[in-house]
Image: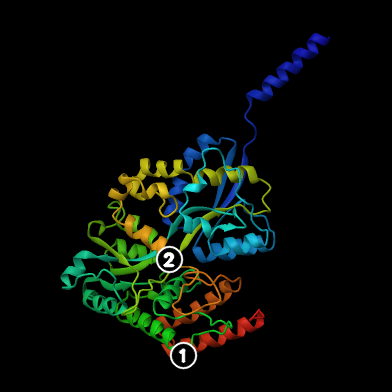
Amino acid sequence: MKNTARGLLGACCLAALSVPAAAETITVATVNNGDMIRMQRLMSDFNEKHPDIQVEWVTLEENVLRQRVTTDIATRGGQYDVLTIGNYEVPIWAAQDWLLPLENMGDDYDAADFLPPVAAALTVDDKLYAAPFYAEGAMLMYRTDLLEKAGLTMPENPDWDFITEAAEKMTDPSAGIYGICLRGKAGWGENMAFLTAMANSEGARWFDMDWKPQFDSPEWKTTLETYLNLLKNYGPPGASSNGFNENLALFQTGKCGMWMDATVAASFVTNPEESTVADSVGYAPFPVRAGGDNHGNWLWSWNLAIPATSTKQDAAKAFVAWATSKEYSALVAEEDGIANAPPGTRTSLYENPEYTEAAPFAEQTLNAIETADTQSPSDQEVPYTGGQFVSIPEFQAIGTAVGQVFSAAVAGTSDADQALAAAQALTTREMSRAGYPK
């Protein structure tokens, strides 16, 4: 009897060992840009390495993603196990204890390889709270053939006067070519990311040292008038609806002479499988004002973070470690070419001569990231940090509201003076309600 029981027990144990444990499902919220879509396409590698973890994706447009993940984490909703968030949110949410510190990511996970400016923006009290999937500065991408046809040569440090001249000469509506494409879609991370960087380059600032809004300053007037002139006279139709993805598609199909935006776009506009103008793209620094040297100080990273509310933190950590590892970068290189490896995060990528040879934008990208001064983004003294955003919790709402005002101006419902007056009034009101100065 005893032997029979032992035999049955042994059989049960063997059966349990031979059946894979039930897979644990994690939900990943992410943005619908090209690098994130590529990651989803390469998920078979993760599935092979982690058969006990299944991943469900929630892929959203940028503005919608921000709204949903912010609501979920602020209300402790617990819908997601991994969040795709920016370096704007990470320090604010970490201070609220909303994120899990990323520790013990595995013996092969080389966190020390992250570019110092990128890692610093994700670190609070010496703890990393998100892992960068890719990072970016901002730069000017332009059509070398159209610039040559216009009889111009790109300066080493182009200013806004040159950009205006080039946009005018490149524009040919009869051929469906517009001199310049810029973000016009409203959103603190859409048109206001670009406009805040442009304002920095013009010497403007969001707030003075007493947190008084500065949209009534001459620097902001110059910024907005230049922006509206460029988009209304030399931009594509419907520019007020165009964000990063829309402008990427326009540039790839030969509709834009110049495009100032995130450096991460470079691999897509030079990929001959995706871009009809891949062989005629040049790069230059983000423009400065005439005689100035401020290139806007744009520094952004899309990062993977784990909310403290996740009940599947080990599985979530395994996914984050895979997606932000050197091995994932190598996988992209093997599948899609090394020029498409996630840019801006790891020092080792820029020390790889194979990458720098294959990616003509590598040097410009690295320089844009390493020279971005997010501690002093404007030439004037400011009470905040952040390059193309203001690092206070209220900025999401205020930035989006101002973005709507400026987007409406692009659409023609107001002029620059009216838009700036509206921005000044609404920002003053909201900052007062929030209790500034604090």
The residue identified by callout 1 is 418
Where 89 falls versus 52 (above or below)? Answer: below
Circle 1 SS class: helix
Placement of the N terminus among the 4 image quadrants = top right
> Residue 77, position in %: x, y?
68, 58
Residue 7, quarter of the rendered image: top right
> Residue 119, position in %: x, y?
51, 55
> Residue 207, position in %: x, y?
53, 81
305 or 255, which lies in front? Answer: 305
Q: Which residue does the image show at 50% across and 85% down from the upper left? A: 214
Density class for disc 2 (Cα within 10 Å; few <14, some 14-19, many ≥20) is many
The residue identified by callout 2 is 372
Q: Report the side of 133 relative to 289 (left or right).
A: right
User: How was the colour assigned to the protein in this rendering?
Assistant: rainbow
Q: Is residue 265 visible?
A: no
Label 1 with label 2: CB-CB less than 8 Å: no
Circle 2 SS class: loop
Q: Nearer the viewer, mark 1 or mark 2?
A: 2
Total marks in image: 2
Where 151 falls versus 346 (above or below)? Answer: below
Instruction: Tell me the kind of residue under disc 2.
Output: Ala
Instruction: Tell me the kind of residue under disc 1.
Output: Gln
Q: Which residue does the image show at 64% across and 46% down from the upper left? A: 313
Give the CA distance from mark 1 to mark 2: 31 Å
